[in-house]
Image (cartoon, coloured by chain):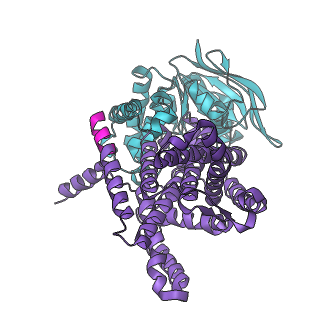
Chain colours: A purple, B cyan
């Protein structure tokens, strides 16, 4: 059984490395590669937000804030902390790619940790209460973090934070996107994931079954924030340049739209919707100034036709496919 | 030893005393009924015992622990499970998953192992599925296992709520009007089920019910509440003939 898992892991790594080699060779239009990488970031954000909105049913509208915490912490780490570490440990002797990877991992750890910490600070007071307090608190947090960043000169303030070394690539973005999908799926299949679904459905009934509602909500929120921070760290080292405007309220709403369109509670839906909603604006580029009008109209139309989202709460897995097939066979 | 005991349990809502110093004893393996006219405070007693309300005074003793004022999830850890008068299932989960949520406490498995899909977590997941299936089989609703809870027939929903409570392996079960809305045949089945819960599951049961044939037929002791006060307490025969009870239910025109 575990051999199967190791084999699967190796297969994913090999596939991603092969694609990375192909993209690095320059045979594929760099614009397509860039769009593909942006899709990976959208997938990470949508899948992580789905944990708190879709699974736990708590509305968070400041996801871009946690993304920003991860991105700026990771960026600041490599810009300010990495050079002294390099000197102290004499890392210059290492080959460049290995050094880059080591710093990328350290930066991801830093970004993830601080985003998780921010998640705890926002979630703990607001999730103890019932109702929409989380929505208000996260809205405030999202705006606050942007304003703070704009006023910190060390990370460029309103001009943006440039000069972050580019350590990330298609391989890392895709690998972490896959890892986050895997984490979300594992959570959904465990008792902790089911506890979240129970909380979404009925907090009172969940609590009398021995589920510590506050603890589970906060844990889900911290996990969701941590994953967003991880995505931010990768983004910082992919773009090499961060600006406060790309982490504003609109960005948070974009991520929410991905979760809603995909079907709240479905990781499959979050992935597909993230990819579609990243591709559609790119495909509509030909329409120039009408682009965003058409895009918005498409969203409205979609919600009218399919309010439960693409997949509802349905998940793609061997079990659900088998169940569907058996049902079809029963019905002659 | 008593499975559950309340001493002087009191709950006020503003000026209204919903439960007025209730002294209730549920013996180990016993079946105690709680009856009274609408608004007598029966469900408030359940909400106090299960931790949804904090009492204003009094104690709730479960195996020498005073659980008064403890949050619901801690009360549940002491083996108290309940159902609700207005069924509160997890509507968009399957019947099987409802029961698996019920088994949350007894499942085990750390968060880290869960999100990393560790071997331990997967093993526990498989086992919890089997255990939940077993509970559904015991209650006789296993053929609905993969149906969404919200789409089930009413009688099955009531049974599923009991199954979900049982999955947490409680020692005390609080049933809030389990026969409400059931036809006579379903009520008879339910009486059999309650008898089995006492014998096979070794539970102690506290029951709120309006169906007098149900209550008088199976309860060993009955407490009658009216406006929060205990107006009578004793075996079914005594309650049936108690003048205070007759007055509370029918008004004093009987005299």
Q: In screen coordinates, is A317 left or right of A84?
A: left
- Front residue of this view, candidates A314 and B48: A314
Indicate whether residue A7 is drawn in magenta.
Answer: yes
Would you say residue B183 is visible in this rendering?
no
Q: In screen coordinates, is B11 left or right of B111?
A: right
Q: Residue at x 75, y 63 (%)?
A: A157
Across and down, in percent, residue A288 comes to 52, 87
- The relative height of residue B28 versus residue A123 in the rendered view (above or below) is above
Across and down, in percent, residue B68 comes to 71, 27
Asked where in the image residue B36 lies, by quadrant, the reply is top right
Q: Residue at x 54, y 48 (%)?
A: A104
Q: Residue at x 66, y 43 (%)?
A: A84
- Front residue of this view, candidates A257 and B145: A257
Q: In screen coordinates, is B185 left or right of B208?
A: left
Q: Look at the magenta stretch and give its main secondary structure.
A: helix
Label tally: 0
Q: Residue furthest front?
A: A93
Q: In the picture, which quadrant includes the N terminus of chain A?
A: top left
- The relative height of residue A76 versus residue A146 in the rendered view (above or below) is above
> Magenta part of the protein: which range?
A2-9
Q: Residue furthest top?
A: B1
Q: Residue furthest right?
A: B15
Asked where in the image residue A128 lies, by quadrant, the reply is top right
- Front residue of this view, candidates A208 and B201: A208
Indicate whether residue A213 is drawn in magenta.
Answer: no
Across and down, in percent, residue B39 comes to 68, 43
- Front residue of this view, candidates A319 and B225: A319
Q: In the picture, which quadrant includes the C terminus of chain A?
A: bottom left
Would you say residue A124 is visible in this rendering?
yes
Across and down, in percent, residue B11 comes to 75, 35
């Amino acid at each position: 059984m575990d051999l199967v898992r190791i084999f699967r892991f190796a297969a994913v790594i090999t596939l991603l490395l092969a694609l990375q080699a192909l993209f690095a060779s320059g045979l594929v239009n760099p614009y397509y590669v860039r769009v593909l990488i942006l899709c990976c970031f959208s997938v990470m954000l949508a899948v992580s937000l789905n944990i708190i909105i879709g699974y736990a049913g708590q509305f968070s509208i400041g996801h871009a804030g946690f993304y920003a915490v991860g991105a700026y912490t990771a960026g600041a780490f490599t810009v300010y902390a990495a050079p002294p570490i390099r000197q102290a440990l004499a890392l210059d002797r290492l080959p460049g790619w290995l050094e880059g990877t080591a710093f990328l991992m350290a930066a991801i750890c830093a970004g993830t940790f601080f985003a998780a910490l921010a998640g705890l600070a926002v979630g703990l007071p607001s999730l103890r209460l019932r109702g929409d307090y989380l929505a208000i608190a996260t809205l405030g947090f999202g705006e606050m973090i942007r304003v703070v960043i704009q006023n910190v000169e060390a990370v460029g303030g309103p001009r943006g934070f440039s000069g972050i070394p580019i350590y990330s690539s298609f391989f890392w973005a895709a690998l972490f996107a896959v890892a986050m999908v895997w984490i979300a799926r594992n959570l959904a299949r465990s008792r902790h994931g089911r506890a979240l679904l129970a909380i979404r459905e009925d907090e009172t009934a969940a609590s009398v079954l021995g589920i510590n509602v506050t603890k589970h909500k906060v844990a889900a929120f911290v996990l969701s924030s941590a994953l967003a921070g991880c995505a931010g760290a990768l983004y910082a080292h992919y773009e090499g340049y961060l600006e406060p405007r790309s982490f504003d309220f609109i960005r948070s709403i974009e991520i929410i739209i991905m979760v809603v369109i995909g079907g709240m509670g479905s990781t499959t839906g979050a992935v597909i919707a993230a990819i579609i909603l990243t591709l559609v604006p790119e495909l509509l580029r030909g329409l120039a100034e009408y682009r965003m009008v058409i895009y918005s109209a498409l969203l409205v139309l979609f919600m009218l036709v399919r309010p439960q989202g693409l997949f509802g709460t349905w998940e793609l897995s061997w079990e659900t496919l088998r169940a569907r097939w058996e049902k079809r066979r029963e019905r002659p | 030893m008593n499975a559950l005991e309340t001493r002087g349990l009191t709950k006020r809502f503003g000026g209204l005393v919903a439960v007025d110093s209730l002294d209730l004893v549920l013996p180990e393996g016993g079946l105690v009924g709680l009856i009274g006219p609408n608004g007598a405070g029966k469900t408030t007693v359940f909400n106090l015992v299960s931790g949804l309300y904090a009492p204003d005074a009094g104690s709730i003793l479960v195996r020498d622990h005073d659980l008064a004022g403890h949050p619901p999830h801690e009360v549940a850890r002491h083996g108290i499970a309940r159902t609700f008068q207005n069924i509160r299932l997890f509507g968009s989960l399957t019947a099987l998953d409802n029961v698996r949520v019920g088994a949350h406490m007894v499942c085990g498995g750390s968060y880290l192992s869960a999100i990393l899909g560790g071997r331990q977590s997967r093993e526990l997941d498989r086992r919890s599925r089997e255990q939940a299936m077993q509970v559904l089989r015991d209650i006789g609703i296993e053929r609905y296992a993969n149906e969404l809870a919200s789409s089930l027939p009413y009688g099955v929903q009531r049974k599923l709520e009991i199954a979900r409570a049982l999955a947490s392996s409680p020692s005390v079960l609080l049933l809030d009007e389990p026969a409400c809305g059931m036809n006579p045949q379903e009520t008879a089945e339910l009486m059999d089920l309650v008898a089995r819960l006492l014998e096979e599951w070794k539970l102690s049961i506290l029951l709120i019910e309006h169906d007098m044939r149900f209550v008088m037929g199976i309860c060993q002791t009955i407490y009658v509440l009216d406006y929060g006060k205990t107006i009578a307490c004793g075996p079914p025969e005594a309650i049936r003939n108690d003048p205070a009870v007759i007055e509370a239910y029918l008004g004093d025109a009987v005299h």
